[in-house]
Image (cartoon, rainbow, N blue to C red):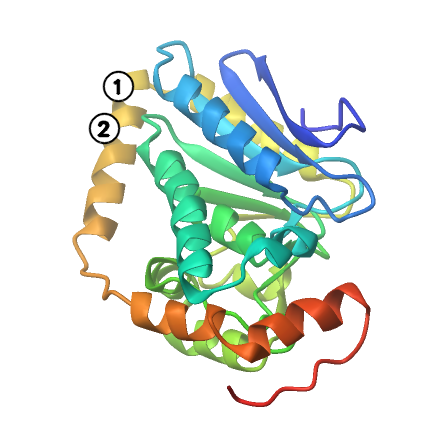
């Protein structure tokens, strides 16, 4: 169901019995998203929102490169000010909003790392199906030194638990999928090599379900989650992205060096 169909960089779409599969592909880069990939993903989501033949939308990573290791760090060299960083987060946020706007259930099928923006995309989906060995996190405190939007933190915390999400972010930890089943963050845990089969069984159930019930339940659960207010943290995003530490983090990451943080 979700086996890779191509090795080219991009977001590749195909439909299988009413299920749209959007595959994130960046071979050799752990499927990190480029600016072009964000644009392609936004376009596919916009087109999917207008379709009436879909039962579900699956987001997954291509091949053995994992789900998605966030944004391609090379792209972050374009962010030279706090406003640039804020614009970037709003751009990614628009893609996350587009996932949430889809009228059908969304499923993240995860093997390997779902990190940074990959974590945000997976957490935005209604359901996560993960293979044993998959990991989730946003180790930005150890890597590039930026900040996450409040909406992403709220979403992850509501699904994973506030204490676990806080510890994960502050310690730059990657949490195994096996530890996230009890909280419901991971809905189904597949044994190694069984992700496709586990996903297929879930999709078979959805295909046999009443379409209007699926759509109305999907909309209802999203409204319940959206009823909780999310604070604005644009000032904090501006502070982090406008810092010398962020520029140092990006530089050091690309050179595979340890960043020298200055706190400014």
For residue 212, which numbered disc appears in the image?
1
- Residue 134 percent across, percent down from the top left: 68, 55
Residue 254, relative to residue 32: is it above or below? Answer: below
Q: CA distance from mark 2 to mark 1?
A: 6 Å
Left or right of 139: which side holds 252? right
Residue 123, relative to residue 180: is it above or below? Answer: above
What residue appears at the point 20 percent right and 43 percent down from the top-left corner?
223
Question: In the image shown, does 75 or 29 lie closer to the viewer?
Answer: 75
Image quarter (top left, top right, bottom left or bottom right) of the N terminus: top right
| Contact? badges 2 and 1 (CB < 8 Å) | yes
Left or right of 202: which side holds 208? left
Residue 71, relative to residue 193: is it above or below? Answer: below
What residue appears at the point 43 percent right and 54 percent down from the top-left corner?
89
Residue 228, relative to residue 131: is it above or below? Answer: below
- Residue 148 percent across, percent down from the top left: 44, 65
Which residue does the numbered mark 2 point to in the structure image?
Answer: 216
For residue 258, which numbered disc appears in the image?
none
């Amino acid at each position: 169901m979700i086996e890779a169909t191509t090795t080219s960089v991009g977001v590749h779409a195909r439909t299988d019995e009413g299920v749209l599969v959007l595959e994130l592909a960046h071979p050799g880069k752990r499927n990190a998203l480029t600016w072009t990939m964000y644009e392609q993903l936004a376009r596919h989501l916009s087109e999917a929102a207008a379709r009436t033949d879909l039962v579900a939308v699956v987001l997954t990573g291509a091949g053995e490169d994992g789900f998605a290791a966030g944004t391609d760090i090379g792209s972050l060299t374009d962010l030279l000010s706090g406003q640039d960083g804020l614009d970037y987060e709003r751009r990614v946020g628009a893609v996350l909003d587009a996932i949430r706007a889809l009228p059908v259930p969304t499923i993240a099928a995860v093997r390997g790392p779902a990190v940074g923006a990959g974590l945000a995309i997976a957490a935005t989906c209604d359901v996560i199906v993960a293979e044993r060995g998959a990991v989730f996190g946003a180790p930005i405190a150890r890597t590039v030194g930026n900040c996450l939007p409040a909406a992403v933190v709220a979403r992850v915390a509501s699904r994973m638990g506030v204490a676990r999400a806080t510890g994960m972010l502050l310690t730059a930890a990657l949490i195994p999928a096996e530890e996230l089943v009890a909280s419901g963050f991971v809905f189904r845990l597949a044994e190694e090599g069984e992700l496709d089969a586990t996903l297929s069984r879930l999709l078979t159930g959805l295909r046999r379900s009443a379409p209007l019930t699926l759509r109305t339940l999907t909309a209802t659960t999203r409204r319940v989650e959206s009823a909780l207010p999310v604070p604005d943290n644009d000032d904090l995003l501006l502070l982090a992205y406008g810092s010398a530490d962020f520029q140092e983090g990006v530089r050091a990451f690309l050179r595979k060096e340890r960043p020298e943080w200055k706190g400014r």
